[in-house]
């Protein structure tokens, strides 16, 4: 079987699991390069958001840069694996293979847990090997899942970040980290699906 076709089958199967199976409402993305999202018939907005999160399922390589304290761009490359966790979440594990990941120093790895929580909406919880804290963000999907935007939840006065994911194709997306106060770019990483 063609590896690209096999990958699509895995993603569609994962999508059905996230969406709650028996799904048949199709939403076309505002980006025609993306496959349509199938959401559960009669499902809620939470179900639709969960179906859109399935775009992150897969094996990814990434490369990009973060702004270092000295103003230089710290480059990084690595791998990421996005899997469905407990039918309701997408867990993305990141492993840095070279360079520094994130604006807060070197990270050997980290994880992002994406969810659609009733009464809250899309959420992302992140943690990494070099940080003793957990980061929580709340966001939204736009363009039927072609763009995801998350804002960090912190007390007022603390520096917050915005994280966006823009899908250029089913097999490629760009993650951009911005300072929520002045919108300056703190980092940008391009993720490309690994087809085996």
Image (cartoon, helix red, strand yellow):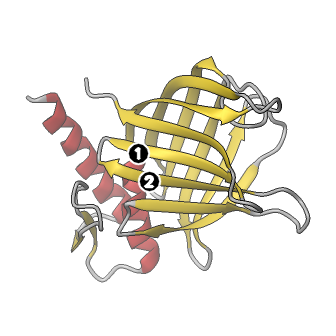
Q: Circle 1 is placed at which residue position? A: 173
Cβ atoms at labels 2 and 1 below 8 Å apart: yes
Q: Secondary structure at mark 2?
A: strand
Q: Secondary structure at mark 1?
A: strand
Q: Nearer the viewer, residue 14 or 149?
A: 149
Q: Height in image: 42 above or below 192?
A: below
Q: Is residue 5 left or right of residue 139?
A: left
Residue occupying the far bottom of the picture: 42
Residue 24 at x, y = what percent? Answer: 20, 72
Which quadrant would residue 191 be assigned to in this image? top left
Q: Quadrant of the image for the C terminus?
A: top left
Residue 34 at x, y = what percent? Answer: 25, 55
Q: Is residue 55 left or right of residue 119?
A: left
Q: Quadrant of the image for the N terminus?
A: top left
Residue 149 at x, y = what percent? Answer: 55, 62
Nearer the N terminus, badge 2 or badge 1? 2
Q: Circle 2 is placed at which residue position? A: 166
Q: CA distance from mark 2 to mark 1?
A: 5 Å
């Amino acid at each position: 079987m063609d590896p690209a076709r096999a990958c699509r089958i895995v993603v569609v199967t994962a999508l059905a699991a996230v969406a709650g199976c028996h799904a048949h409402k199709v939403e076309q993305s505002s980006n025609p390069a993306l496959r349509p999202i199938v959401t559960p018939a009669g499902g809620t907005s939470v179900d639709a958001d969960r179906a859109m999160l399935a775009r992150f399922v897969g094996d990814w390589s990434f490369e990009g840069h973060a702004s270092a304290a000295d103003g230089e761009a710290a480059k990084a490359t690595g791998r990421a694996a996005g899997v469905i966790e407990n039918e309701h979440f997408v867990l993305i594990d990141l492993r840095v293979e070279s360079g520094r990941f994130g604006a807060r120093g070197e990270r050997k790895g980290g994880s992002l847990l994406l969810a659609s929580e009733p009464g809250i909406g899309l959420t992302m919880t992140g943690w990494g090997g070099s940080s003793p804290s957990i980061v929580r963000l709340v966001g939204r999907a736009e363009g039927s899942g072609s763009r995801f935007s998350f804002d960090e939840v912190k007390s007022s006065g603390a520096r917050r970040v915005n994280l966006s994911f823009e899908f250029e194709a089913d097999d490629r997306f760009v993650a951009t980290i911005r300072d929520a106060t002045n919108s300056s770019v703190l980092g940008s990483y391009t993720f490309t699906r690994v087809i085996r």
